[in-house]
Image (tube, rainbow, N blue to C red):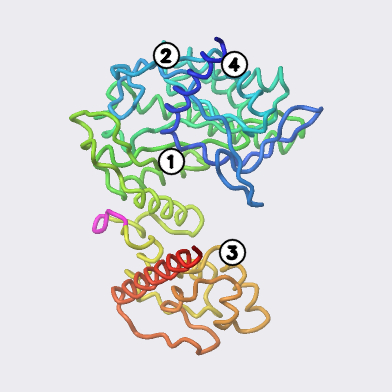
Amino acid sequence: MDAERITEKLNILADAAKYDVSCASSGSKRKNENKGLGNASNGICHSYTEDGRCVSLLKILLTNHCIFDCAYCVSRKNNDIKRAAFTVQEVVDLTINFYRRNYIEGLFLSSGIFKDADHTMERLVRVAKKLRTEHKFNGYIHLKSIPGASNELMHEAGLYADRLSVNLEMPTEAGLKLLAPDKNRQDMINPMNFLKNEIILRTEEKKLFKKAPLFAPAGQSTQVIIGATPESDQQVLQSANYFYKNFNLKRVYYSGYVPVLADSRLPALHTAVPMVRENRLYQADWLMRFYGFHVNEIVNSEQPLLDLDIDPKLAWAIRNMQAFPVDINKADLQMILRVPGIGMLSAQKIIGARKFAGVGWEQLKKIGVAVNRARYFIVCKSNEFERRDLTGNNIKQFILAGSQSKYIKHTQTQLNLF
């Protein structure tokens, strides 16, 4: 009977947790010492590590009872759904049992807010503490920080969790007030600010004292829901950029609104956010964090929405044809990184290769450059490809046509296998 009860809870609370996407990777390197249980590895929750491994974690809510009535949330207090709650010990036992059966490599634990923020956060921390101290569990633990929780609890959470995250929910404060009037943006900002300062402090301590305790070694992240409120991509990315700069976030996750509830404040139930919009936001986010792009270069008041047909790097290049062609054998790394079809690793290889000889098209192919895309924006040593003087719109059409042709050929190849 107990097993049936636990299984029912698991079904309910795992299903309720699926809307939180901010557990895709860890970045933690917690080591297993003194014959403990498990190891934290890079990339958790059906993500891929650098060596290609796919890893997973137990992703559940502690409870789907909640005192708030957020319009977009399936666990809102006025939603007529089946409620359930785990005890602290039940979550610990599930995690250990699943790990020993090789089902998971870690735990992502969130919760509806019951009673108040501290009451909920205290139980999340107890789960992590029991796993670490009683079971010597060294697997990955990601705790969802509860907005409004005390600094003392946030500090304790950082000692046991690899990553902590506070969901901003909506990209703007206006959007939050519209759909979650019971929530206060400042209650989200305070723990994020506390964690930022603690992580900086503990990192400096670790440099001075090797035995200083770990504190949220995988940092903190957040999640915003897109499409539930009318913010443009410009507003979403400006918000993300602000939190990257001011709170040292590891990641901002973009979750397309899933219409599960009817509410006059929400889009119609049949209106789902296209997956491609999520994808474009992640691509733009990547450009901001690793390729040196400013938000206003990607989106601005004149073009507040990302182009859904092409990626934001190509869109920027087409809008700025005056910056091209780039001489691949003379341009600096930052400019090479702005060429469509050239990624971070390929750009670094180009810089290294041209020290010994001029780089031509054949070398670019071997390096891994998407030549059919990059050819419109660069010149190099050889003349295998003749760069035609085309407008941005023409280039866009050529690339889209090439992508479609490649898709058709791939589909035909798959059909020929049967």
| Residue 126: numbered disc | 4
Q: Which of 66 and 239 is in front in this view?
A: 66
Q: Mark 2 points at which residue?
A: 114
Give the CA separation, mark 3 to mark 2: 47 Å
- Which amino acid lies under the numbered mark 3 shown in the image of this protein? Leu
Dot 1, how many residues are within 10 Å of its Cα: few (below 14), some (14-19), or many (20+)?
some
| Residue 150: numbered disc | none
- Which amino acid lies under the numbered mark 1 shown in the image of this protein? Phe
Q: Earlier in the sequence, mark 3 or mark 4?
A: 4
| Tag in front: 1 or 2 | 2
Q: Mark 3 points at which residue?
A: 345
Q: Earlier in the sequence, mark 1 or mark 3?
A: 1
- Marks 1 & 2, CB-CB < 8 Å contact: no
Q: Which of marks 1 and 4 is nearer the N terminus?
A: 4
| Residue 243: numbered disc | 1
Judge left or right: residue 359 versus residue 227.
Answer: right
- Marks 4 & 2, CB-CB < 8 Å contact: no
- Marks 1 & 4, CB-CB < 8 Å contact: no
Q: Which of marks 4 and 2 is nearer the N terminus?
A: 2
Judge left or right: residue 136 versus residue 225.
Answer: right
- Asked whether 33 falls inside the magenta stretch, the response is no
Quadrant assignment, res 137: top right
